[in-house]
RNA sequence: GGGCGGUUAGCUCAGCGGUAGAGCACUACGUUGACAUCGUAGUGGCCACUGGUUCGAUCCCAGUACCGCCCA
């Protein structure tokens, strides 16, 4: 039964994938024939995710490396899995709850909500896995990992131990002092109501406004404000009773703790150390703040004076810390103005005390709510408007002319002079508040897209500075190599300037921080609750020997009471140590009750994915069967997560198991559309890989991905290109179909011996492409591997070898026919093997079709190791190249001279060298056939009016005096000659230059000489041809 | 502002010391014994610009212009 005319990807792919999987072909160690391991950890896709072109690209490369190594007999593991994606998943589930009319997260409470998340995960979490399978990914799915597996509330089937690994690492790092908790200014996402890391903040330039306000000096003081030019000449003098401040965020004025000017700023020297008034809030409770000096203010920017709001700005925070300025928090977790605490008058009075010199703690300051009563509860942007209105109304805005260009679009056009046809303005200038239209950088949450608020909160941090050095060292010494090399530079730059990593998130979905506090705030970090209880128990037991200690874990918000061993219930449970001491002194005996509450925060998702390499392998409970895959070999991932993930894995693995996680990092760009634009739903240029697979097959998409994958290359995915590689698959299919129809012998275990030149030649070419592919893959030059195979399969096998074989198989003698059938079968098999890592489906299908008694499926076929040294026959190579050039020369000349394609023309050969004669004789049938020529005769002179085809070692003439136009042939030859002479000029120029001959490497000189000789021969042949044509006229 | 890249055929990209390649597109011809998802032939490039190093530069170095990306 003849094969179909093309590969039915839609039908075959699922069937083939099932066969692979059911046979355990992807299991770790499958097909291993040597001890060396090769392992790759998949960059875990979000459990909420769906396959996009980036995954498709990324996984194609990983799969190629894995399949290639597996076929080569390595003990191979491709570890798959998913990431729990804290914020994204929590958001998705909340949306689902809202959409289906179920109670929301807060109504459900933590436990119930997490139950919903797990349900959701079990229902949808496998989506991306099934999509990766459609791509042909040969990961060991039996080991699929999940970053939340083994968490305390995980349902059955989610019982890995990733959670244990995460918790263990946290505890160890805590005990080593690498993790700490502190009140720090963090990036706060008011939408998700959680801290996020600085990497999750996108700074974007937006149209903003800068307001200029007057902060009146306390007690109506005045000073002389003087401005000088560069030479020290006074250019402006004014008596002022205020200091002018510029701000882009007026609402934060409420929390100002000081006004700062630069040490060297002479303009404000007279008032440094004095107090000024924040020009907002109830008149009777205006707060006074000091004017201080610091290095931070830029004298050339704005007025040179800046307000310091330590709790809401990173720069201000530093200034406040340096100068011990109180940092007042103004907003709640949603970014609304605080509504807690006492009335404003009371709070302002407290603040005044601290401003007046009373000692304070960070907590005491944080408790103060300095938002005036009328602004409480307002959204921060609403509050901004009101603050501005109030200040302007009070006349404390800096005013300017309405024509001031700094006002931007709001500026009024300057009046036109009467001379220019305008009307002179007579009234006094209208003054308006100075609100500069300015581009400002604003921080946005990368997921929420809302404006991020710097917020002073308690958070957990990894002291990255203490673990960064080994990670830097590993790359510096080349132990881990990052490709492309520019990635290493970026890596150094970031790690050398690394900031502490905020790892706590105010979310529910994630690994809850394993720290419990007693009500004094003492922290107990332990892998389990029982262990924390024990720690607390031991601690107090030591302090109060002889007393019974009862430790209980409560939930935040509810006081817990518990009977002691004597059955007595504590009346007023006093937890503070001082309280206990008092009780002891009073001689009261009873048990001491210690209540513990667990930190409600969870860990940043990247903290767990930072442990991906060891966590997936079962650390800390791993054994040789899994630990042998560590360190892994290569990480293939997007360069956009170099910092998020790669750098953190480096730091974490080195900190935890003192080894690198991988020896090579292959970074790639984002996959873009064909014009180079980012794909986005809003632009509507998203290419869905599943749609592509449906239409063109997974192999076409994979080949396209491979061909795009040059090191550091830009990835522009175009459907035309995919279509082209689908066609390539069809080409392979049809060459195989031809082979099958003509008795090619597939499934041989030995390389067939060849006597025919063409067979020797293609065997040598096969060895050549095998070496090229291996070299390319070893160097991660996927595009080179793909292109070499494309050129070989299409350009060599299909275009030449299949054509050459036709006369041999169809018209040749039995021996030649049999030999050619064997060689062809072998060559096709080699094509399938070499292409399999890139195009697994079509090759596996052909592998099964072309021979019935294969010992293994192609997925486990042995990768060849033959070399060019063994298989290239120089003579056959030279002969075939000569034959090809002759055929091409004849075809080209015929086409240009409009010789009818169906016409078999006779040929006359002249001045033939022995090698050319021999080459012609041994390949005569196929040359005749492919060049469409008749009898070949030899003569001393070419017939008059013939077409000339020069070759190395012989000149050929097609005697077509009747058909051809002599002038056209002249023109054709002159054109060729023109090109030739340009080349000759270059070659002669070089060889005539003594310095070239002296300095260039010998082989280059030899090559040039050889080239020159060839070109000169060709030139002579063409000139002779022209001379003959000239005779005719 | 700091860092990292890019600029090669109409388009998308390789190449990165020895004088330029692929795919697509385009033009002409073609139902030649697997393939029209094809075949044959062809058109098309001062390799951004200016200097330098070198016997020789698209390739190395310096600068300029323009375009990206990352970080402030």
Image (tube, helix red, strand yellow):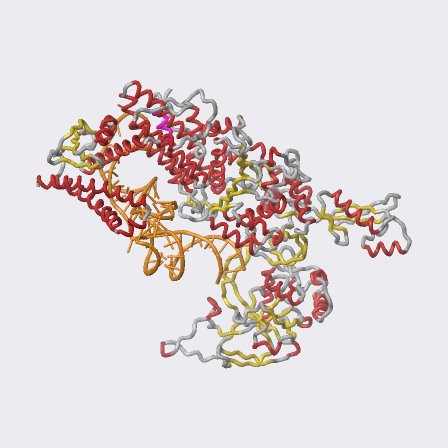
Q: Nearer the viewer, residue A979 or A732?
A: A979
Judge whether residue A254 can be spotted in this image: no
* Along the viewing direction, whichever of A370 and A351 lies nearer the viewer: A351
Q: Position of residue A306 (x, y in %)?
A: 58, 69
Q: Is residue A253 left or right of residue A920?
A: right
Task: Give the magenta-colored segment's residue range.
Answer: A732-739
In the image, residue A71 above or below residue A612 = above
Main structural element of the magenta stretch: helix, strand or loop? helix
Image position of A158 (left or right of A912): right
Q: Quadrant of the C terminus of chain A?
A: top left
Q: Is residue A179 above or below residue A928?
A: below
| The residue positioned farthest toward the top in the image shown | A814
Q: Position of residue B16 (x, y in %)?
A: 38, 48
Please state which of residues A673 and A424 is positioned toward the viewer in this rendering.
A673
- Nearer to the camera, A167 or A952: A952
Q: Is residue A736 magenta?
A: yes
Q: Is residue A956 above or below residue A88?
A: above
User: Quadrant of the image for the N terminus of chain A?
Assistant: top left
**Which residue, as the protein is rendered here, is positioned at the far right?**
A587
Q: Position of residue A679 (x, y in %)?
A: 46, 46
Q: Residue lying farthest front?
A: A998
x then y, percent, for residue A920? 23, 29
Residue A347 shows in this picture? yes
Q: Is residue A880 above or below residue A1?
A: below
In the shown orientation, is residue A205 left or right of residue A991?
Answer: right
Is A466 included in the stretch rendered in magenta? Answer: no
């Amino acid at each position: 039964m003849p094969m179909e005319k093309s590969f039915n990807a839609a039908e075959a792919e699922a069937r083939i994938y099932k066969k692979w999987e059911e046979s355990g072909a992807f299991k770790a160690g499958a097909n291993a024939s040597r001890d060396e391991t090769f392992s790759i950890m998949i960059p875990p896709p979000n459990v909420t995710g769906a396959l996009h072109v980036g995954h498709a690209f990324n996984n194609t490369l990983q799969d190629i490396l894995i399949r290639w190594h597996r076929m080569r007999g390595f003990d191979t593991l491709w570890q798959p899995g998913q990431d729990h994606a804290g914020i994204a998943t929590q958001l998705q589930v909340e949306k689902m709850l809202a959409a289906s009319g179920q109670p929301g997260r807060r109504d459900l409470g933590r436990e119930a909500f997490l139950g919903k998340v797990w349900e959701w995960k079990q229902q949808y979490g496998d989506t991306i896995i099934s999509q990766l399978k459609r791509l042909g990914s040969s990961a060991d799915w039996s080991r699929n990992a999940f970053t939340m597996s083994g968490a305390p509330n995980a349902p059955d089937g989610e019982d890995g131990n990733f959670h244990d690994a995460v918790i263990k690492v946290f505890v160890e790092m805590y005990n080593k002092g690498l993790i700490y908790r502190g009140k720090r200014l963090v990036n706060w996402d008011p939408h998700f109501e959680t801290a996020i890391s600085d990497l999750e903040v996108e700074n974007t330039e937006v149209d903003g406004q800068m307001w200029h306000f007057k902060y009146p000096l306390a007690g109506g003081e005045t000073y002389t404000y003087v401005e000088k030019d560069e030479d020290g000449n006074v250019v402006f003098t004014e008596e002022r009773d205020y200091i002018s401040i510029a701000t882009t965020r007026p609402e934060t004025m409420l929390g100002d703790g000081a006004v700062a000017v630069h040490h060297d700023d002479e303009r404000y020297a007279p008032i440094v150390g004095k107090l000024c008034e924040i020009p907002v809030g109830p008149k009777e409770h205006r707060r006074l703040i000091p004017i201080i000096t610091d290095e931070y203010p830029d004298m050339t920017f704005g007025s040179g004076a800046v307000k310091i709001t330590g709790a809401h700005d990173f720069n201000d925070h530093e200034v406040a810390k340096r100068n011990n300025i109180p940092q007042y928090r103004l907003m709640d977790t949603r970014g609304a103005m605080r509504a807690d605490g006492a009335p404003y008058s009371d709070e302002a009075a407290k603040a005044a005390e601290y401003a007046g010199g009373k000692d304070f703690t960070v907590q005491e300051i944080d408790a103060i709510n300095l938002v005036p009563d009328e602004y409480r509860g307002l959204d921060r942007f609403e509050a901004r408007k009101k603050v501005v209105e109030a200040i302007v109304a009070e006349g404390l805005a800096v005013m300017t002319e309405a024509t001031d260009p700094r006002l931007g679009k709001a500026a009024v056009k300057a009046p036109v002079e009467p001379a220019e046809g305008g009307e002179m303005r007579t009234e006094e200038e209208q003054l308006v508040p100075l609100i500069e239209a300015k581009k400002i950088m604003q921080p946005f949450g990368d997921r929420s897209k809302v404006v991020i608020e710097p917020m002073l909160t308690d958070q957990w941090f990894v002291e990255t500075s203490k673990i960064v050095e080994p990670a830097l060292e590993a790359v510096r010494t080349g132990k881990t190599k990052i490709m492309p090399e520019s990635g290493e530079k970026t890596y150094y730059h970031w790690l050398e300037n690394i900031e502490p990593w905020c790892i706590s998130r105010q979310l529910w979905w994630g690994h809850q921080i394993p720290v419990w506090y007693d009500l004094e705030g003492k922290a107990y970090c332990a892998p389990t609750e029982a262990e924390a209880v024990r720690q607390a128990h031991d601690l107090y037991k030591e302090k109060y020997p002889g007393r019974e200690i009862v430790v209980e874990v409560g939930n935040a918000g509810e006081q817990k009471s518990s009977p002691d061993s004597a059955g007595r219930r504590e009346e007023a449970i006093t937890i503070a140590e001082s309280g206990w001491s008092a009780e002891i002194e009073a001689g009261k005996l009873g048990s001491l009750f210690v209540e513990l509450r667990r930190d409600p925060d969870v860990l940043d998702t990247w903290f767990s994915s930072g442990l991906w390499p060891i966590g997936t392998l079962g650390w800390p409970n791993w054994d040789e069967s899994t630990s042998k895959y560590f360190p892994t070999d290569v990480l293939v991932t997007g360069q956009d997560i170099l910092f998020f993930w790669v750098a953190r894995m480096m730091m974490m693995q080195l900190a935890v198991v003192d080894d690198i996680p991988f020896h090579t990092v292959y970074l790639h760009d984002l996959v873009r559309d064909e014009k180079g634009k980012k794909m986005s739903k809003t632009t509507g240029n998203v290419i869905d890989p599943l749609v592509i697979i449906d239409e063109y097959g997974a192999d076409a998409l994979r080949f396209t991905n491979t061909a795009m994958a040059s090191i550091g290359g830009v990835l522009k995915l175009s459907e035309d290109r995919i279509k082209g590689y689908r066609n390539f698959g069809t080409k392979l299919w049809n060459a195989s179909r031809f082979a099958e129809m003509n008795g090619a012998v597939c499934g041989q275990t030995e390389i067939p011996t060849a006597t025919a030149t063409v067979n020797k030649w293609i065997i040598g070419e096969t060895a050549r492409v095998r070496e090229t592919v291996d070299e390319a893959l070893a160097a991660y030059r996927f595009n080179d591997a793909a292109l070499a195979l494309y050129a070989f399969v299409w350009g060599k096998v299909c275009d030449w070898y299949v054509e050459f074989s036709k006369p041999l198989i169809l018209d040749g003698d039995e021996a030649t026919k049999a030999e050619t059938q064997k060689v062809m079968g072998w060559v096709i098999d080699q094509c399938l093997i070499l292409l399999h890592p890139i195009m697994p489906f079509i090759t596996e299908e052909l592998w099964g079709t072309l021979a019935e008694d294969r010992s293994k499926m192609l997925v486990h076929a042995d990768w060849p190791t033959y070399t060019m040294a063994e298989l290239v026959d120089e003579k056959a190579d030279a002969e075939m190249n000569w034959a090809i050039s002759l055929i091409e020369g004849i075809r080209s000349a015929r086409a240009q001279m409009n010789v009818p394609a169906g016409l078999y023309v006779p040929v006359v050969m002249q001045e033939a060298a022995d090698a050319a004669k021999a080459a012609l004789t041994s390949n005569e049938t196929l040359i005749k056939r492919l060049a469409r020529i008749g009898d070949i005769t030899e003569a001393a002179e070419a017939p008059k009016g013939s077409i000339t085809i020069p070759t190395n070692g012989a000149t050929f003439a097609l005697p077509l005096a009747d058909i051809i136009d002599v002038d056209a042939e002249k023109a054709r030859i002159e054109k060729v000659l023109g090109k030739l002479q340009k080349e000759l000029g270059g070659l002669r120029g070089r060889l005539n230059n003594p310095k070239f001959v002296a300095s260039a490497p010998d082989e280059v000189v030899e090559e040039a000489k050889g080239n020159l000789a060839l070109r000169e021969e060709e030139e002579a042949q063409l000139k002779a041809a022209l001379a003959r044509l000239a005779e005719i006229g």
